[in-house]
Image: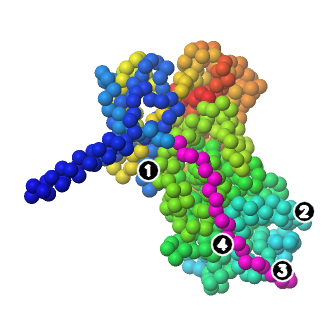
């Protein structure tokens, strides 16, 4: 018995020594710009933050790491204490940027293209939901409309596209889409052995699920299973484009996106592992790969701008990890696609484009696939990414060098959208009700706060997440205090939509842009109306000036805002101080059918 107790005591002593030797020694003040992980226990985090003066500010990122998409309630509270005592913080070392080297599997030599038949029949999934095969699949009879060295265009006999449209698809595929895919991710197998990749063009894609779903393009991954029966798959290397697509850059972008899906679907079936039996990649990572590969072809943002802006407007209610978009009721929802694109893009920035083929040909799927490819736990990748997403907007020019990917300014304009970084709240730890906050955070979503205090001292923060969540908390002491520009949106008694801008931090500010767009989180969410941006001249007309003196308030009535569709609108403003530092703010204006409700965060601001 004594020996047993001695061994237990020795084990505990050694465990304490190991803990003391390996833990990060955190001292106050925290290093500016450094990401710190806050320890959590039973979905609760408690820690102290010292404020040397009114200019001390911290970025606080509260994340729900739970795998489910359900929103969970977070309670945040703060209280003043005499001295900083609780510091369960761990310094997060930056990832060492590395270029992963991945071998792209060689495709078998294909024979010379066989003579094409005049007509060919394909089976298309048209129901958009599980049903009997007879009700789910539609026979599409096609004719050969054109061909290139590696591609054939099969046109639905019930549709028409002009010869210029066909030539544009062929030329784009041969000169850009196929060579870029071959370089970075590989090519799909020649499943049907005809020596050419097939593109089926049909207007059926604009009336799927009884007309409820309209797609620009799609891939049926089961088509790449050569062992499937004819009633289950076409057993062909093929993708589908809508005959409704107009010529131009968007057509080429959709083609590049869908060809990436073809590579992924074929690659997983052709290179299945004996250890991993997953035939299909999870929805979130499958779409992320296709969007990033699409980015490798061009800097056309028509397939991404609305998705990125929707996510940035609601990061706390947008899930990242969604194994099956349809099952989760998020099929075609814009914000989750923007979230997964930005996350995988960030990963490619860290590990290089070699990460993409590692994901495609591993045989794994989802989070396990990403962890095996990067060698990092998903939770730590996400923690770094979530903080960096905010901090990127504070850099000198708002842009990051991304190697082979086109640059994105998270606080600038992307395609037709005006971005303002991830939406956040300013949390001023003054006495009274401001010491408490609450938030609803979905699984793999994050709520952002910039925490400040009006007086010198130490504040003890406590964050508690509802049961079912998986709380993750990160803190960054900001290098410079953020000036305050508040935005409010409301309806006047005369029924006009009025915007109010207020400078709260004693800085002279120049307003650069105001933008708004409908918030969308629905099934089959389409891009909808383009965002409306008011720039310098239009802003001056709306507000009378584009400059705010310290403490000044500007009000304006943009006429276009009254014509926005009913429902919630995300409104953001971007400005600069005299040092050229960027500032942003957010508000929500709900133009509901049952009346007008206004919700605004009066101190949501950002500075770069």
Residue underneath mark 4: 266
Q: Residues within 10 Å of mark 3 (few under 14, many from 20)?
A: some
Name which residue lies at 23% across and 52% down.
Answer: 11
Which sits in the foreground, 51 or 244? 51
Name which residue lies at 43% across and 19% down.
Answer: 52
Which sits in the foreground, 399 or 584? 399
Mark 2 or mark 1: which is in front? 1
In the image, residue 354 lies in the stretch drawn in magenta: no
Mark pair 3, 2: CA separation: 23 Å
Residue underneath mark 3: 113
Mark pair 3, 4: CA separation: 19 Å
Magenta range is 94-118
Question: Helix, strand, or loop for circle 2?
Answer: helix
What kind of secondary structure does the magenta stretch mostly adopt?
loop
Location of residue 189 in the rendering, given as x and y in whole percent from the top left corner: 70, 75
* Quadrant (top left, top right, bottom left, bottom right) of the N terminus: bottom left
Residue underneath mark 2: 164
* Quadrant (top left, top right, bottom left, bottom right) of the C terminus: top right
Residue underneath mark 1: 65
Residue 344 drawn above or below residue 57: below
Question: Helix, strand, or loop for circle 1?
Answer: loop
Disc 2 and disc 1 in contact, CB within 8 angstroms: no
Location of residue 429 in the rendering, given as x and y in whole percent from the top left corner: 41, 25
Q: Earlier in the sequence, mark 3 or mark 2?
A: 3
Mark pair 2, 4: CA separation: 30 Å
In the image, residue 95 lies in the stretch drawn in magenta: yes
Q: Is residue 499 visible?
A: no
Residue 271 drawn above or below residue 423: below
């Amino acid at each position: 018995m004594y020996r047993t107790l001695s061994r237990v005591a020795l084990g505990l002593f050694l465990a304490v020594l190991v803990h003391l030797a390996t833990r990060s020694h955190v001292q106050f003040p925290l290093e500016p710009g450094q990401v710190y992980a806050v320890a959590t226990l039973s979905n609760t985090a408690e820690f102290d933050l010292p404020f040397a003066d009114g200019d001390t500010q911290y970025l606080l990122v509260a994340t729900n790491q739970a795998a489910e998409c359900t929103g969970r309630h977070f309670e945040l509270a703060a209280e003043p204490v005499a001295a900083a005592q609780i510091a369960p913080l761990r310094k997060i070392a930056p990832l060492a940027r590395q270029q992963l080297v991945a071998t792209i599997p060689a495709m078998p030599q294909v024979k010379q293209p066989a003579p094409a038949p005049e007509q060919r029949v394909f089976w298309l999934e048209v129901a958009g939901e599980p049903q009997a095969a007879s009700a789910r699949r539609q026979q599409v009879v096609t004719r050969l409309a054109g061909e290139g060295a590696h591609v054939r265009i099969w046109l639905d006999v019930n549709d028409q596209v002009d010869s210029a449209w066909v030539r544009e698809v062929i030329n784009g595929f041969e000169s850009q889409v196929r060579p870029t895919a071959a370089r970075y991710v590989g090519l799909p197998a020649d499943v049907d052995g005809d020596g050419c990749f097939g593109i089926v063009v049909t207007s059926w894609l604009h009336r799927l699920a009884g007309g409820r779903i309209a797609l620009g393009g799609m891939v049926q991954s089961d088509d790449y299973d050569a062992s499937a029966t004819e009633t289950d798959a076409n057993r062909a290397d093929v993708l589908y484009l809508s005959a409704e697509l107009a010529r131009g850059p968007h057509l080429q972008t959709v083609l590049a996106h869908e060809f990436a899906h073809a590579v992924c679907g074929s690659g997983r079936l052709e290179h299945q592992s004996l250890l991993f039996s997953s035939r299909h990649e999870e929805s979130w990572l499958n779409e992320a790969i296709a969007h990033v590969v699409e980015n490798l072809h061009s800097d056309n943002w028509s397939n991404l701008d609305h998705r990125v802006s929707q996510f940035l407007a609601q990061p706390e209610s947008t899930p990242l990890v969604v194994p099956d978009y349809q099952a989760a009721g998020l099929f075609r929802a814009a914000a989750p696609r923007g979230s997964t694109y930005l996350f995988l893009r960030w990963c490619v920035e860290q590990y290089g484009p070699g990460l993409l083929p590692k994901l495609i040909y591993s045989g794994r799927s989802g989070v396990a696939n990403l962890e095996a490819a990067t060698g990092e736990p998903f939770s730590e990748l996400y923690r770094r990414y979530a903080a960096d997403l905010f901090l990127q907007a504070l850099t000198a020019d708002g842009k990051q060098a991304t190697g082979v990917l086109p640059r994105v300014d998270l606080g600038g304009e992307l395609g037709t959208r005006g971005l303002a970084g991830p939406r956040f709240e300013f949390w001023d730890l003054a006495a009274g009700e401001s010491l408490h906050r609450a938030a609803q955070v979905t699984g793999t979503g994050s709520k952002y706060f910039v925490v400040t205090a009006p007086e010198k001292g130490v504040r003890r923060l406590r964050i508690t997440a509802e049961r079912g969540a998986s709380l993750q908390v990160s803190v960054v002491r900001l290098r410079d205090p953020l000036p305050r520009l508040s935005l409010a949106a409301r309806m006047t008694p005369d029924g006009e939509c009025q915007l109010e801008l207020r400078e709260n931090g004693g800085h002279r500010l120049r307003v650069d842009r105001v933008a708004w767009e409908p918030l969308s989180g629905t099934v089959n969410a389409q891009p909808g109306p383009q965002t409306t941006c008011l720039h310098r001249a239009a802003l001056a007309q709306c507000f009378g000036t584009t400059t705010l003196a310290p403490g000044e308030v500007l009000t304006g009535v943009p006429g276009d805002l009254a014509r926005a569709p009913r429902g919630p609108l995300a409104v953001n403003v971007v400005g600069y101080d005299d040092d050229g530092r960027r500032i942003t703010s957010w508000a929500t204006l709900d133009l509901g059918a049952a009346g007008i409700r206004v919700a605004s965060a009066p101190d949501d601001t950002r500075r770069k």
